[in-house]
Image (cartoon, rainbow, N blue to C red):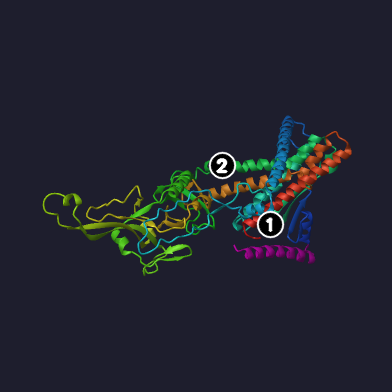
Amino acid sequence: MAFTTAVSLFLLTWSGLFLLDFVLRALAVRRYIDFAEKHHIQISPFQLRFYTHRYDARLMPQGIGDGEKSLSRRMGRKLLTLWFDLGVIVVLACTVFVTWYLTSHIWHALPSSSSFNERTRDMPRPIPARFHTPAPLPANDNTAEPVFQGDDPIDHPHRDEGLTPIIPGVNMPWAHIPMFMIVLVMAAVLHELGHAWAARLESVRVSGFGVFVLGIYPGAFTEIDDLGLNQRPTWSKLRVYCGGVWHNLVLAAVGCLVVYSTPYLLSPFFTTGSGVTVEEVSQQSGLYGGLKPGQVVTKIDHCEVYHPLSWVECVKALQKERYGRCVDSDAVLAAKSSKVTIFDNELHCCDEQKNATPAHICFESGVVTKRNHPETRAPNLADALRLGGPEKPREVVRVETKLKRQLSCLDARSVTSQPSCNETTPCEASDQTRPKPTCIYPALYNGTRLVRLEVGEADKPVLFVGRMEEFLYLVEVSPLISRWSWVPKVLPHTVELFGKYVVTLSVALGVLNAVPCFALDGQHIIVALLQAWKIPRKRRHRLTQFSLAYGTFLLGANILIGFTKFFYSYKLM
């Protein structure tokens, strides 16, 4: 989806929603007004808000609430108390860790602005891979060996980028927006429910609960009786303040479990060991459009693929070795090209071929040529000194053998279906009556390779010319292969993607709220801790303000650094 189209739909949706609310209220449509007042629905530009006071025991786990007298209720209350106590310990440790992490991240960004700009501008780093340079054939006597400059290496993002904004259409596909919003609503609602459950456990009144949407980013909020909460002990207040972050971390753990257990959860519908299923192909890859999600790849060139590990092993093996194909010598000679051009850093030799198709590319081979040179050999000096008549000069023929490069324009699909060959595995003649096949190589000098992918249930293989690193970093594969045709092939990818979004968004929402920053849960946590410290009131106030100011600075600076790196990496600045 184009960016302008997405923005237009966004503005049209919010404008229509706001206009509809305005018209219905202006016309005094009683049913709509009663419904909106009952559920406290408010619509303003780019914001939708829902609020309810009906926050009752149906949202509460067993053991939370007032008046529990039965044994099961008391046991449930004790277990929940231990649950929230564990949450307090984990969240306090998380607060210390995230403060240290944000501090160290700023520290690493402190050097001179020039070096900072170099790091941010070069943030997508080349993949550390071994590029194999084809062994050059001896140069032709008549033509000079062309020099080609390789393409830019594939960009690979840092493993640690700090805080990175999520912008649809830039670093998040438009198709992921529904899943993104669903997961974000889940994380936000569970966060607020964690506060509410802890408050009810401590007999603190919960006034209401609400959900809102700001632009495309949903959220939630809970109103708790602050006066009643402030009268509780410090540890009780920490249970309430840490309840949201704690449940976000628990949700992230559940999402991680879903990601790693997907093969076992879907094993009744999927099998393994007979190839890999393509989950996603990046639009930056040359495979995009040719290799489609849901297709099963069983072979990369001559290398069999059984699972994702063998997928990686095949790619690395093809990176290290240069393989050619054994093609009939007469066909290679018949497709010989004499006109060679260089366009867009690529060699072209098919311009003079009338029947050439987009699948035709240049192949090179070494042709052995022999040339006879008649020579007159003089008598040997030792023979001339012998007794008798002198030996007469004799005529001899010297045979000059030379290996020359030959370029041929051939159909890549037909060539890649032939047996493989290289310097250590030469071509063998299948029939003694026919000449020995010629080992030809794709004439690619810019670090790219010609690769043939065998795709199950496909009439034709997928041909690819590009860098082998694209298979590792721009293509996602899964070991799961559907047992039946009616099973959606993208189901494993959807389940894993959902789990990854749950982990990412839950950790982000939880960890950021643990920062001792104004208006976040970390503010209430640090205030509750310092209030329990028996120090003079003025010193406690100064320490509180310093802690919150430092945490706010950390969060703001890291967000600024994250946006700066983001804009530089996507060349938006």
Mark 2, residue position: 260
Depth check, front residue: 250 or 330? 330
Task: Tell me where residue 293 appears, x and y as whole percent.
Answer: 50, 54
- Residue 427 is labelled as none
> Which numbered disc, 1 or 2, marks the residue that appears first in the sequence?
1
Image: magenta residue range: 1-29
- Judge left or right: residue 469 versus residue 213: left
Count every numbered label the image shows and give the total: 2
Who's the residue at 83% across and 44% down the image?
Answer: 545
**Residue 10 belongs to the span the image colors magenta:** yes
Q: Is residue 545 visible?
A: yes
Mark 1, residue position: 216
Q: Is disc 2 placed on a helix, strand or loop?
A: helix
Task: Tell me where residue 142 appears, x and y as whole percent.
Answer: 35, 64
Task: Tell me where residue 158 appears, x and y as whole percent.
Answer: 60, 49
Asked if the residue at tag 2 contacts the one at tag 1, i.e. Cβ–Cβ closer than 8 Å, the answer is no
Q: Which amino acid type is marked by label 2?
A: Tyr
Mark 2: few/some/many CA within 10 Å (<14, 14-19, 20+): few
Depth check, front residue: 524 or 259? 524
**Residue 398 belongs to the span the image colors magenta:** no
Q: Is disc 1 placed on a helix, strand or loop?
A: loop
In terms of image quadrants, where is residue 262?
A: top right
Q: Which amino acid type is marked by label 1?
A: Ile
Main SS class of the magenta portion in the image: helix
